[in-house]
Amino acid sequence: MGGDAAGPVPTDQHDFALWEKRVDALMVLCSTKGHFTVDGLRRVLEDMPEEAFETMTYYERWIASVNQNLIEAGIYTTAELAERMEQVTARGTTYGDATGG
Amino acid sequence: MHHDHHNHHHDGMSPSGHPYRPDSDTSLSYWQTMEIAIRELLIAKGVTTPSEIAAQIDAMDSRSPANGAAVVARAWTDPDFAERLAQDAGAAATEMGFDIGPMKLIAVMNTPQVHNVVVCTLCSCYPRNLLGLPPDWYKSRAYRSRTVREPRKVLAEFGVTLPDDMQVRVHDSTADMRYIVIPDRPAGTENLSEADLAALVTRDSMIGTGLPRTPAA
Amino acid sequence: MAEWASGMTVRVKTYAPPGHVRTPTYLRGKTGTIERVLGPFPNPEALAYGVPAPALPLLRVHFPMSEVWGADTENPDDTLEAEIYAHWLEKADD
C-alpha cells in the first residue's frame, strides 16, 4: 500500500450512520472483552480480495471482519448467524424496520 | 467537550448537527442485516447489553478533536508540560484527565524548521481517544499510499505548502503507537487564554495535514 | 534484551511471507537508524492468528526519504519514521 500510485485524496466526508457507529462499538467492546484482537481484525481485512476495497464501504468491511473474528472465537456459529439474519430480513425492508425486533 | 444534543439516537441527529444518513428509510443491505444479527446474538449470548453498546457509542461521540486541542494549548502555554509530552505523551495526556485507555501515544512537535505528518499505511490507526473517529480521507487508499512517498504534494492538496528549507517528517504508525502532531504556535497569540488557543487548533493540524488558525486581526 | 539501542544502524529484512505482517513492503531492505526503543509488546503477527504471542522489542526506525525512494524522492531532506518489530531487523555496520 505505502508508496503505491494513487489519485487525489478524496475530501468528501460522511456523517457516520447509526449502524456504522454500532459496528465500531461492537468492535471496541468485543476486543476489549478479549474475544479477538485488533490484529485479528486487521488480518481478516488484509485477507479480503482486492475487489472488497472497491465494492464494500469501510464499515461493511469492518462488520465482515468482526464477524469472521467472532466466528473464529467461537462466540456463535455460522448457522446461528444465518438463522438470525433470516429473522432480521423477515422484519422488513428498511434498517428501521429490521432493527425493531 | 460540549454536547449540543442530548438525544444522540432518539432524534436522529448526529453530534455534528447533521442527520445521520437516512438508513432508517433506505433498503436494508446485507451488511446492515449482519450488523443487526451480530448485535442481537451478542446480547442473547450475554456478551454485551443494549445499554453497554449505547454507552460505548456515547463515549466515542464525546471524543472529539477538542481533547487533542486542549493538550496542544497546554503544551503551548506550559513548557514543562510540553517537555513531559515530548517524553511520554500518554502520561501527559492522562495528567490532563483524558482517558487514553491502552493507547500508547507519541507527540511529535512542529517547529519553524520541521513539519510532521502522520499516516497509517497498513490500516487506519488513529489516536481516537484524543481526536475522535478518523475522517474518511485518512482511511482512503490515496492518503495511505501517497503520504509516505510524496508528502509535500499531498499536503499541497490540503492547502499546506511548505518551503523547501523546512523538513517534512512522515510518521507511519505501523505498530502499537499512536501519534498526535503538536503544531507550531501561531504568531500573535501571546495574550490569548488557553481556551482561546485551543480554539485555534484544528483536527487536521494535529494530523499534520493542516495548520492552526491564526487569531482574527 | 539490551541488544537494541537508539542510534544503532539497522536494515529491514527482505522477507516476503504471506499473511499478517506489520512491516510495510516499501521499507523492506532499507537501512535506517533506531530513533527509540519501545516495548516489549506481544508480536502482532501471532496475535492476529490467536496463537501465543511472544513479547518482542519494538523499534522506532528513522529513514531518510532518499533511502526509501531513491531517485523518486520528493525531497531528500525529508524523513520517514516507522515502528518495526525486532525480528524484522538486522544490525547493519555503517
Image (cartoon, coloured by chain):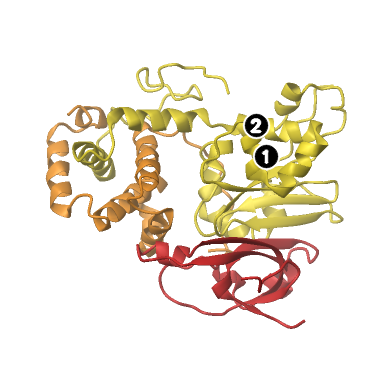
Q: Are marks 1 and 2 on the same chain?
A: yes
Q: Which residue is mark 1?
A: B92
The residue under the point 24% across, 54% down is: A71
Q: Residues within 10 Å of mark 1 (few under 14, many from 20)?
A: many
Which chain gets the yellow colouring? B
Residue B89 appears in the rendering: yes
Rendered colour, chain A: orange
The subunit carrying tag 1 is B
Q: Position of residue A84 (x, y in %)?
A: 15, 42
The residue under the point 47% across, 33% down is: B60
Callout 1–callout 2 Cβ contact below 8 Å: yes
Give residue B194's quadrant in the image: top right
Instruction: For mark 2, give the secondary structure.
Output: loop
What residue type is disc 1 on? Ala
Instruction: For mark 1, give the secondary structure.
Output: helix
Q: Position of residue A57 (x, y in %)?
A: 39, 47
Whether C53 is drawn above or below A9: the answer is: below
Horizontal side, residue B143 vs residue C93: left or right: left
In the depicted view, which residue is nearer to us: C5 or B134? C5
What residue type is disc 2 on? Met
In the depicted view, which residue is nearer to us: A36 or B156? A36
For the N terminus of chain C, the image quarter is bottom right
Outermost front residue: C1
In the depicted view, which residue is nearer to us: A55 or B69? B69
The residue under the point 85% across, 46% down is: B112
Q: Position of residue B168 (x, y in %)?
A: 76, 55
Q: Which residue is mark 2?
A: B96
Give residue A29's quadrant in the image: top left
